[in-house]
């Protein structure tokens, strides 16, 4: 199920957390992985780990806020593999603060990286996907982009923007057999959430009907589905992986 053999998949923000889990899951299903991150040493080491497992993988240093970096990555992938089948817009950042205290630079950075970065990467891969008349684009949003959260107006705006952006692009490229979808994780057990005080973790879990944190692998499985042939008739959708936190 969800066989991705021969598909060339780019994952942004791939060196850790959810991006790493997505990359591993895609590779396990046969995809050729292009793992990208602004953290050069980390992403190179990750590609080496994948290659050591017998996977086909290559690392690129990619800053999704830099148009030249995006262009160089896409050109490099096409030169190396000849095609791009899957793009996963995972790179993201949070700069939390109540709106009354939020610095303009923190608003701008989160929007530029989380939303404009996904726009720029998606735009860059559309030409080869249109040429080959096939492609899968999956962007990682958040439950916060659906329900909001105090202290995260910048993050919520960027993640909600990904949903509207993806729906619009899905309509534009459906005729070329390109699907565009969103995965919206809820509370996921990552290094960031593990650092929260136990009382805060318990309070958040109390809001989840399944009464637990999700795993990065839960999110990765949703991405693999949307990248696969089994999801060929799914586009412009938001697949929520949140344990029922938001319905």
Image: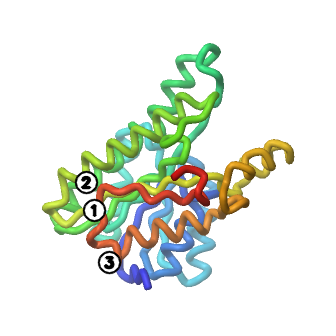
| Label 2 secondary element | helix
Spatial distance from mark 1 to mark 2, Cα to Cα? 6 Å
| Label 3 secondary element | helix
Q: Report the disc number at residue 179.
A: 1
| Mark 1 or 2, nearer chain start | 2
- Quadrant position of residue 82: bottom left
Res. 184 in view: yes
Does 3 sit above or below residue 100?
below
Residue marked by disc 3: 229
Q: Are marks 1 and 2 in contact (CB under 8 Å)?
A: yes
Spatial distance from mark 2 to mark 3, Cα to Cα? 16 Å
Residue marked by disc 2: 170
| Mark 2 or 3, nearer chain start | 2
Q: Report the disc number at residue 93.
A: none
The image position of residue 88, as x and y in percent, is 43, 58
Q: Is residue 166 left or right of residue 115?
A: left
Q: Is residue 1 left or right of residue 39?
A: left
């Amino acid at each position: 199920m969800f066989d991705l053999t021969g598909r060339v998949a780019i994952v942004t923000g791939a060196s850790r957390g959810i991006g790493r889990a997505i990359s591993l899951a895609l590779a396990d299903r046969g995809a050729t992985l292009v793992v990208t991150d602004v953290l050069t040493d980390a992403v190179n080491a990750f590609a080496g780990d994948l290659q050591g497992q017998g996977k086909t993988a290559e690392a690129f240093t990619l800053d999704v806020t830099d148009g030249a970096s995006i262009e160089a990555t896409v050109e490099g992938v096409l030169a190396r593999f000849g095609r791009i089948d899957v793009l996963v817009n995972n790179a993201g950042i949070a700069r939390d603060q109540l709106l009354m205290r939020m610095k303009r630079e923190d608003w701008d950075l989160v929007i530029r990286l989380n939303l404009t970065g996904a726009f720029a990467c998606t735009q860059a891969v559309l030409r080869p996907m249109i040429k080959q008349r096939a492609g899968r684009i999956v962007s990682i949003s958040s439950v916060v982009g659906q329900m909001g959260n105090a202290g995260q107006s910048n993050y919520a705006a960027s993640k909600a923007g990904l949903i509207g952006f993806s729906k619009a692009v899905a309509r534009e490229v459906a005729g070329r057999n390109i699907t565009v979808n969103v995965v919206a994780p809820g509370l996921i057990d990552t290094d960031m959430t593990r650092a929260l005080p136990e009382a805060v973790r318990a309070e958040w879990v109390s809001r989840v009907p399944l009464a637990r944190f999700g795993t990065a692998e839960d999110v990765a499985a949703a991405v693999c589905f949307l990248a696969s042939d089994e999801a060929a008739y799914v586009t412009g959708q938001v697949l929520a992986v949140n344990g029922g936190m938001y319905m």
